[in-house]
Amino acid sequence: MNPVLLEPWQHALPPRIRAWLHQRLISEDIITTAKLGWTGKALSIPIFDQHGQFAFCKFRKDPDDRDPATPKYWSQLGARAALYGCEHLIHRREKIVICEGELDRLCLESQGIAAVTSTGGAGVFKTEWGKALQAIPEVYVCFDNDAAGWKGARRVAQLIPHAKIAEIPPELGLGSDVTDFFVRLGKRREDFLALLAEARPLPKERPEKMHTERRNPTKHTDAAVSQIKGHSSIEQMIGQYLSLRRSGRTYMGRCIFHDDRVPSLAVYPDTQSFYCFGCGIGGDVIRFLMEAEHLTFRDALKVLAHDASTPWKKISNH
Ligand SMILES: [Zn+2]
């Protein structure tokens, strides 16, 4: 892509998209300095290297586009994962937040908080970035509140030994992120700094714990769960979210939980399970639905029960 396009795209940013960015607490100043633009169909987010040279563009789908077939984010073809905000490394910040997602980063920057993110999603964080970030005295990792986020945060914390994990308040629910913290809770810069002050160096083993709590059904529910799982075909359900291609007894598709350029997500009809070789997310049909729709275990069951025409009463009646 020719960087010459960036300026016309900047001028083409429609008022409704600008308003949407403001709702996400991305300031006018940051919209300008980040050179956000509009391709006519998508928001363009130019990624620069640490010398300020344009590297490639990342795109975010039109927030009014409700078609689930359109990916939410994608990169310009041939782009390799980069550290968005890497200019902070040259300026030697005292404190930096590693977050998940370009717009979360811009939300933090709008609050005057230096932040970086991998353009490759939570599952991609290069060792060389970790080494460079070790030079910054205070490093915080604040990823999304979901399985991919927890796994990614653990990996980053392993690369940067002094990094602390800041957790999005659990009341925001599964799948919540930095922007939700500000927008849905009405929080401000001071509140986020307080969140950072509570950050801990070692990640808690919360994901597994949360899942055991959720997956602690009574025997009665257990039977209903098996019944629902028996009624829903995992390849059909996942096939509604991404296009799957058959390869022997397996189906492969591009993972929706990370910025997947090759089909990394495998669906195994034999065991009714899925696994992504890119970000490590995996499990059964319930797990997929929980992650894809940000549902609780019980709500995912409800959806599936409805799907399989199994009365929900059978499950809730315990
Ligand atoms: Zn993945």
Image: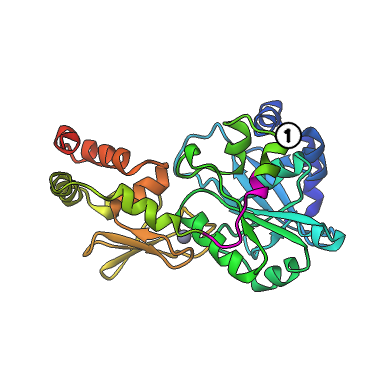
Residue located 61% across and 61% down the image? 201
Q: Secondary structure at mark 1?
A: loop
Q: In this orientation, which residue lies closer to the viewer: 153 or 308?
A: 153
Residue located 38% across and 41% down the image? 295
Instruction: Identify the residue under disc 1.
Output: 13
Q: Which quarter of the rendering shows the N terminus?
A: bottom right
Question: Quarter-wise, where is residue 53 in the image?
Answer: bottom right
Residue located 67% across and 31% down the image? 17
Magenta region, residue range: 195-203
Left or right of residue 253: residue 46: right
Left or right of residue 155: residue 285: left
Question: Quarter-wise, where is residue 82 in the image?
Answer: bottom right
Q: Position of residue 72 (x, y in %)?
A: 54, 45
Q: Residues within 10 Å of mark 1 (few under 14, many from 20)?
A: some
Q: Position of residue 194 (x, y in %)?
A: 67, 43
Work out whether 14 lies above or below 170. Answer: above
Work out whether 266 lies above or below 228. Answer: below
Work out whether 14 lies above or below 305. Answer: above
Q: Position of residue 60 (x, y in %)?
A: 61, 44
Q: Which quarter of the rendering shows the C terminus?
A: top left
The kind of residue on which mark 1 rests is: Leu
